Amino acid sequence: MANPGFPITLDVKGRPCVVLGGDEEAADKVHRLLDAGAKVTVVSPTLNDALRKLAAAAKVIHRVRLFRGQDAEGALLVINTLRTDEDLSRSLYELATKEKFLLCSLDQPEYSNAWLPAVVSRGHLRCAVSTSGTAPALASRLRQDLEEIFDGTFQSFLEWLSSVRESVQGSESDAERRRTLLRDAVSGFKLSGKIDYPKAWLDERAKVKS
């Protein structure tokens, strides 16, 4: 059964986090951690170009070898991008249970105690999309479509709302009046759209109905 989990936003600023792997996917997770202010260690015998540049600029620590248990000491979060080594994933999970750190082994929910949603990032907006691990490809597609909806215009709108909030908090002492002004600022905003389903599913659905 899929585990929906309990969605939260994790504060990793200034906290040690570890990423296992050196490919494009590992680089994506490293960049997301760096954007959030984490102190990142990458454990991998090899790195792709993007990660090599980060290591050369001392933006990440690189352990040029396979993972060892001490790599997780003091870590808040460990992200394992190595899908093909089940023995490693199992031992990592046992270590996470013992040492009580958060572990996400990508596409291996049975060896994870934390899961990474697909994230839409636009200015101050962070919109997380999860299918509870049942359809990662769909979560990725939803992220791509939402990125088109939340475009540069939306980012400018959000920045304007931030300035309005700052101005109202500085000029209006009455709490209820502040809430009213801020609600008025978003009055008229509406997100609308439609869903186009794949033909294969529509055909299957039609068979069931008939």
Image (cartoon, helix red, strand yellow):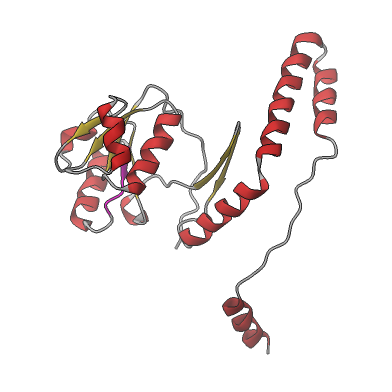
Q: Is residue 162 left or right of residue 24?
A: right
Q: Is residue 156 left or right of residue 138?
A: right
Identify the residue at horizontal 23%, vertical 34% (top origin). 72
**Where residue 26 sits in the image (x, y, percent)?**
33, 44
Q: Residue furthest bottom?
A: 210
Q: Is residue 131 visible?
A: no
Region rendered in magenta: 78-82
In this rendering, the answer to whether 123 lies above or below 144 is above
In this rendering, the answer to whether 154 lies above or below 140 is above
Q: Main secondary structure of the magenta part?
A: strand
Q: Is residue 3 left or right of residue 19?
A: right
Quarter holding residue 196: bottom right
Question: In this orientation, which residue lies closer to the viewer: 16 or 148?
Answer: 148
Magenta stretch encompasses residue 203: no
In this rendering, the answer to whether 116 lies above or below 57 is below
User: Image quadrant for the N terminus?
Assistant: bottom left
Question: In this orientation, which residue lies closer to the viewer: 166 or 97?
Answer: 166
Identify the residue at horizontal 74%, vertical 56% (top origin). 193
**Where residue 126 sits in the image (x, y, percent)?**
57, 38
Question: In this orientation, which residue lies closer to the viewer: 33 or 131?
Answer: 33
**Where residue 181 sits in the image (x, y, percent)?**
84, 23
Identify the residue at horizontal 24%, vertical 59% (top origin). 84
Question: In this orientation, which residue lies closer to the viewer: 109 or 152?
Answer: 152
